[in-house]
Amino acid sequence: MIPIRDDNPTRRVPWVTIILIALNIAVFAYELTLEPSTLEAFWTRWAFVPARFGADPFAPGEMITLVTAMFMHAGWIHVVGNLLYLWIFGNNIEDRFGPIGFIAFYLGSGVLAALAQLAAAPEATIPMLGASGAIAGVLGAYLLLFPGASVVTIIPVFVFIEVARVPAYLVIGFWFVLQLGNGLVSLGAEAPAGGVAWFAHIGGFIAGLLFALPAVLRSRSRRRRRAYSRR
């Protein structure tokens, strides 16, 4: 299933989401200008490398890669896919948390996603890059906050393509099951070059759930108080 938009209006312009998308596009455009050897050096320096980070996690040059890696991408499919998900689901999370809260949420989800990948593959030497971990956090929060929202989704059926409105919990649940299944299969294996950091997705998703949980509990508490006040 490939989501293309949701029917979940926001109350304000999602400026932080727009800025995050613009920053990712700008970094990717810069990557396109680099020669292959220079690009590889750029990735090696600024992407998150689990084994290198684990060897000296408090070195400033390593700590910053927890953030810089979120704004780098390895190709067109990588960047377009990530930013599509960010645009569809990020605006509603920003609307709920506010601009400052959303920045903290997004960066926190991305950092915890990288640390989850470190825990799963501490000896990996392949640079990990991309906004996927932070966006996985967005999906986790969206699942808790807007499970019944309608998502317009492309569904391939053999040689045909269907476009349907699907509840968010099905779209995001299907995505998470894929990440979890692939993550479990990948355990104990060194990811090949160009592989996927499955546990970054899983860790980011769980981080998003945890970050959104207080908002859900507060909302339920307010509804209960209003219900009691009407009696």
Image (cartoon, helix red, strand yellow):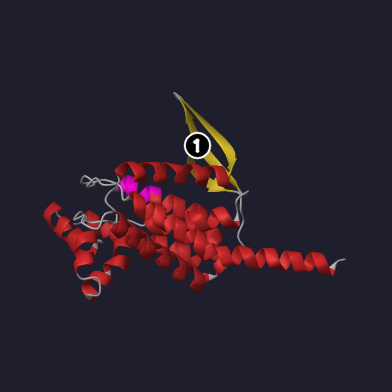
Residue 115's place in the image compared with 57, above or below, is: above
Instruction: Pick the residue in front: 147 or 217.
Output: 217
**From the viewer's perspective, is 186 left or right of 7?**
left
Nearer to me, 183 or 60 = 183
Q: Is residue 12 at least partly visible in the picture?
A: no
User: Is 5 on the left or on the right of 43, as rendered?
Assistant: right
**What stretch of residues is rendered in magenta?**
76-81
Point out the residue furthest to the front here: 188
Query: Is 100 located above or below residue 3 in the figure?
Result: below
**Of helix, strand and loop, which mostly describes the magenta segment?**
helix
Please tell me which residue is depicted at 42% across the width and 41% down the height of the picture: 178
Res. 59 visible in picture: yes
Q: Position of residue 91 (x, y in %)?
A: 53, 59
Q: At 31% across and 59% down in the image, what residue appears?
A: 119
Left or right of 43, for residue 207: right
Q: Nearer the viewer, residue 13 or 88?
A: 88
* Quadrant of res 185: top left
Residue 175: % across, % down: 46, 44
- Can you name the residue that lies furthest to the right here? 231
Secondary structure found at label 1: strand
Residue depicted at 35% across the width and 55% down the height: 200
- Disc 1 marks a residue whose amino acid type is Ile
Q: Which quadrant of the rendered structure holds the C terminus?
A: bottom right
Pointer 1: residues within 10 angstroms few (<14), some, or many (20+)?
some
